[in-house]
Image (cartoon, grey):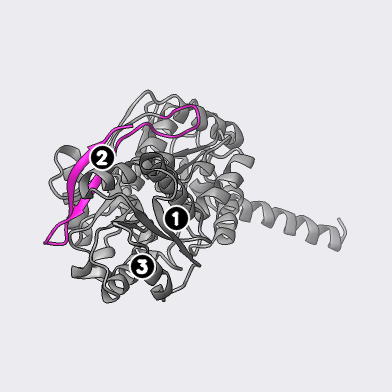
Amino acid sequence: MKRSGLLLALVFSLGLLLTAGCGGDEQKPASQEGGNIVIGFNIPLTGDIPKVGESSRQAAEMYLQQVGGKIDIAGKPYTLKFVYEDNESKAESAVNAQLKLIEQDKALGIIGPMASKQAVPGGEVADANQTPMIAPWSTNPATTTDRPFVFRACFLDPFQGPVVAKFATEEFGAKKAAVLFDVASDYPKGLAEFFKAAWEEIHGPGSVVAFESFTTKDQDFSAQLTNIIRSGADVLFTPQYYSEVALIVKQAKELGWNKPIMGSDSWGSAELMTLCGDACKGYYFSTHYAAAGATGKTKEFIDAFKSKYGYVPDDVAALTWDALGMMVQAVQNAPLTGNLAQDRVAVKDALAAIPSYEGITGSMKFDPQGDPVKSAVIVKINDAGEFEFFKSVAP
């Protein structure tokens, strides 16, 4: 053999050895005993709402610890592997994170994105690549609409908007409403519109006397709040995230607002009271579960989370737990073959076929659109700063 040919043969042989040695068990298909089940998480670990990503990751890590990093499928043990990608609270980053989870990380299924601004484009990518996705916290209808591979673990804004409108009418005797929302973000913009439509259906056209908007990252809301105060509104609805709520509530009070302020499920972060403090006490918001006074396995989850992380889990953590539980159940029910593309389809079919799931945020089942049929909870922020159950509203 010529010297050049010998060198080529040696290089080729070395390449085979390196390929065989790289990855180890990571290269085993999921159908092999001891293979990996990779679940991806598309979450905001940085950006505007990092606490949302932190809560989701913490719930996932606690889940992984409780199952010992293993799940049983048809009598065989599999390693459960979680991969976390940071979407930076941006739509374009959520798309990139989704593609990485699908193409590079080889995720069998994906949990997230959380906020609708990221979940809507993220869902488009998941569906186009036939990869099952569960959005734990995205309430905008567009996340799942006509996307058979996309599911969610929470109720929708067309349900949440009327729930808030009806509650504010009955609880406060309000007849005129004001709304303050981020016009550049899918979630608050959509929910503001659903609330307005529901309010005017109850009270008639023109009963939303102020419909004020701002743009993401704005911090001064004095002009909008001045208009709201002048409008004579009986209640202010602001479906914003915890960082903005604290600013809005404090600025409203400084300008002389002394009437009810209502929020939505985006208020439910554990960070809200850290930022808002006494200013938010006594207000109400619609959400997915109430930690104060919880019983059964919901209380068990809360106690375990608080023991591990030192604070009461918010609705993001609870919804992540339920979304993950449903994804794992679907993986266990699916006839896995070791072919990733086929297995993703099988998991999607198994998700759609779950007859009923008893989660810590309530009992739920998926409708044909991939949305759960479940109740909403109205929470009151009590004098201790706790999110206290006030009432439940069924669909």
Give the residue type at disc 2.
Ile
Which residue carries the number 2 mark?
360
Q: Position of residue 362 (x, y in %)?
A: 27, 36
Disc 1 or 2, which lies upstream in sequence?
1
Instruction: For marks 1 and 3, give the one nearer the viewer.
Output: 3
Which residue carries the number 1 mark?
188
Mark 1 and mark 3: span between their CA atoms? 23 Å
Mark 1 closeness class: few <14, some 14–19, many ≥20 residues within 10 Å: many
Instruction: For marks 1 and 2, give the one nearer the viewer.
Output: 1
164 magenta-colored: no
Q: Which segment is the magenta one?
A: 366-395
Mark 2 closeness class: few <14, some 14–19, many ≥20 residues within 10 Å: many
Mark 1 and mark 2: span between their CA atoms? 25 Å
Which residue is at a point 47% across and 63% down the rendered structure image? 213
Disc 1 or 3, which lies upstream in sequence?
1
207 relative position to 275: left or right: right
Question: Disc 3, disc 2: CB below 8 Å?
Answer: no
35 relative position to 229: left or right: right
Mark 3 and mark 2: span between their CA atoms? 43 Å
Q: Quick one: 220 or 341, which is closer to the camera?
A: 220
Which residue carries the number 3 mark?
230
The image shows residue 19, relative to residue 93, as above or below, that is: above
**Circle 3 — which element?**
helix
Give the residue type at disc 3.
Arg
